[in-house]
Amino acid sequence: MMQPRTETELEAELRAIGAARYHHLHPFHALLHEGKLSKEQVQAWALNRYVYQSRIPIKDASLIARCEDKDLRRIWRQRLIDHDGMAPGEGGIERWLKLTDDLGLRREAVTTMRLALPATRFAVDAYVAFVRERSLLEAVASSLTELFSPDIIRTRMAGMLASYPFVSKETLAYFEARTSEAPRDADFALAYVKRNAKTRELQELVLEALRFKCGVLWAQLDALYYAYVSPGDPPPGTFLSKRS
């Protein structure tokens, strides 16, 4: 039987997964950050990404609902506040809608998700189900993509502000907030995982949870690339600027 990894070894393997699999490597993100997408393609990205944003507090609430550790519940519920806010008009979801508003998308088209790609919805639903159904340790580990998000956020903000005249700093307020929220959340989740994944078997589950989450993010971009870049064939009933 293989010996458990040390905490240092486990963290190194988690970070290696991000280096190899995180969606900053996807060609759609390269096009977005380099200013090579049309406004319609940026709109398609923002509209579809709303599906993911809208489900983040739902998956976090499902984690909290089955957590018997009051300290973990207390810390994790900050994620709900970050995304839902404490009052109408606050929170990350509202900031994402500011982005879609500024891109010229009607809120009804965004919030109903009726124009989102089927693959986007399937991928996001799979993530919510994973957090709801797998062990608490695996659910927490699946959030560790936040370890890698600050760098991509800074690259995205700089690239989009430099390249797209229809984007302003206010448009990207969601990402500005995440530069401080994501590191805080990732530090807590990483410490939790290292503290609780003490056997080789549990460590393998943690690593696989992060691979799964990277796949969820990658699958969403695959769908966007196919529908709106190459071959550029969106499924019937999904987003096109003239009907949004």
Image: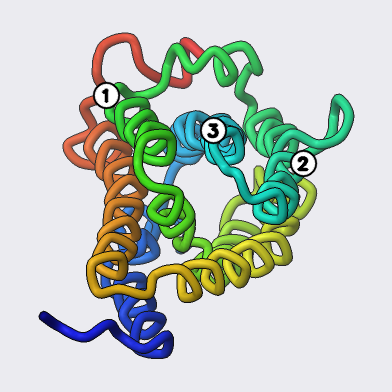
Vertical relation: 55 (above or below) 112: below
Residue 34 percent location from the top left of the image? 45, 63
Q: Residue 107 at what x, y percent from top left? A: 65, 17
Give coordinates of residue 172: x percent, y percent: 69, 50
Tell me the element at label 1. loop
Which structural element holds mark 2? helix
Image x and y of residue 195, in percent? 50, 74
The answer, for residue 159, to whether it is visible in the render is: no
Viewer-proximal residue among 157 and 139: 139
Q: Which residue is mark 3?
A: 62
Q: CA distance from mark 2 to mark 3?
A: 15 Å
Q: Which mark is residue 234?
A: 1
Q: Residue at x 27, y 82 (%)?
A: 4
Give the residue at x 70% y 60%. 181
* Kind of residue at badge 1: Pro
Mark 2–mark 3 CB contact (< 8 Å): no
Q: Quarter-wise, where is residue 216 in the image?
A: top left
